């Protein structure tokens, strides 16, 4: 396993095991103040009960790396479906021709042509919980139609014995709503149905004062995974991190902290400038002296 795939592996472990570090319903709100206020206005408002009770779709928009999946998990962990599964699908990593099957499965005949089976698919895995699609605009119109049909049911549900298991759809996109509408990236009826509640995330470079709180969370998470003692960053490190423009947003910051924690020696408790990776200094265009 090369370094890049190993890093991706650790990041995936963290995403999939947030509840290990933070119990259900207590996933940390680690994102910027302006986004937090946006969430309060759009979600935790007078419409909150309606949103949670009726499993209303949520559309999360923002540049790549701004933390859309973390927000989706936060919404899920505070909803009435928080005890159900959270299924995340990286739509950009799946071949378009395979995506419909990956989401919905397909019926296949057994030896008896009158008997049909349905392979387990992501939509089915999400029953009783939340389905998050990372980039909704790449879905074909055929897939959009099936998702639209699914969420049109009130609530979107499947019969499972005597129980009705709801499913909530949360979608993400790097495009804002006006761009999606103007470029007709989504079917009109589907777009209007899923964009009633929109959470818009801003780039990290526009909120440098929020970097310390993000660094604190990532240090604690990666210290647990890598079995290191680093839990705080020096003022020197935080100043350098604030100076950087973070084109990769939160994902890039997370990568830098991950590499930094790996460089820390066992027993070191404070992240110092010498722990920051060379790639960071190169892009910052500042010498390590």
Image (cartoon, helix red, strand yellow):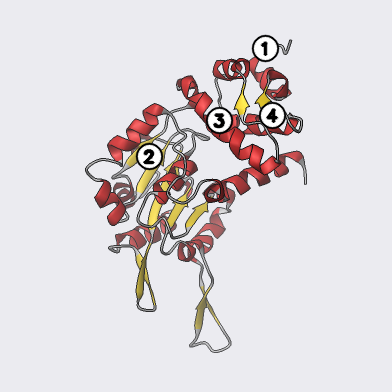
Vertical side of 66 occupied by 144: above or below: below
Residue 48 is left or right of residue 245, and the answer is left
Task: Indicate the quadrant containing the C terminus: top left, top right, bottom left or bottom right.
Answer: top right
Residue 73 is left or right of residue 92, and the answer is left
Secondary structure beneath label 4 = helix
Disc 2/disc 3 C-alpha distance (Å):
35 Å
Disc 1/disc 2 C-alpha distance (Å):
38 Å
| Crowding near the residue tagged with mark 2, few <14, some 14–19, many ≥20 C-alpha atoms within 10 Å | some
Residue carrying label 1: 286
Residue 218 is left or right of residue 190, and the answer is right
Residue carrying label 2: 180
Front: mark 1 or 4: 4
Which residue occupies 37% across, 43% down? 184
Vertical side of 107 occupied by 194: above or below: above
Among the 4 quarters of the image, the one containing residue 252:
top right
Sequence-first tag of 3 and 4: 3
Secondary structure beneath label 3 = helix
């Amino acid at each position: 396993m090369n370094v890049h795939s190993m890093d991706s592996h650790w990041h995936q472990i963290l995403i999939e095991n947030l509840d290990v570090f933070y119990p259900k319903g207590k996933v940390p709100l680690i994102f910027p103040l302006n986004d937090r206020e946006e969430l309060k206005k759009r979600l935790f408002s007078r419409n909150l009960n309606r949103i949670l009770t009726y499993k209303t779709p949520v559309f999360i928009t923002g540049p790549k790396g701004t933390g859309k999946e973390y927000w989706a998990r936060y919404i899920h962990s505070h909803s009435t479906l928080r005890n159900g599964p959270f299924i995340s699908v990286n739509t950009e990593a799946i071949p378009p021709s395979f995506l419909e099957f990956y989401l919905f499965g397909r019926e296949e005949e057994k030896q008896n042509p009158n008997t049909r089976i349905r392979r387990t698919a992501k939509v089915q895995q999400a029953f009783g919980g939340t389905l998050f699609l990372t980039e909704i605009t790449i879905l074909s119109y055929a897939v959009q139609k099936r998702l639209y049909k699914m969420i049109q049911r009130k609530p979107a549900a499947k019969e499972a014995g005597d129980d009705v298991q709801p499913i909530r759809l949360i979608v993400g996109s790097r495009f804002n709503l006006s761009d999606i509408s103007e470029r007709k990236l989504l079917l009109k009826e589907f777009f209007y149905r899923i964009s009633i509640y929109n959470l818009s995330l801003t780039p990290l470079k526009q909120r440098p004062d929020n970097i310390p709180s993000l660094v604190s969370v990532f240090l604690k998470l990666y210290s647990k995974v890598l079995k290191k003692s680093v839990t705080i960053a020096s003022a020197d490190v935080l100043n350098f991190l604030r100076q950087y423009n973070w084109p990769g947003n939160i994902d890039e910051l997370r990568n830098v902290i991950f590499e930094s924690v790996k460089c820390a020696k066992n027993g070191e408790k404070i992240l110092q400038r010498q722990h920051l990776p060379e790639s960071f200094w190169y892009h910052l265009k500042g010498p390590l002296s």
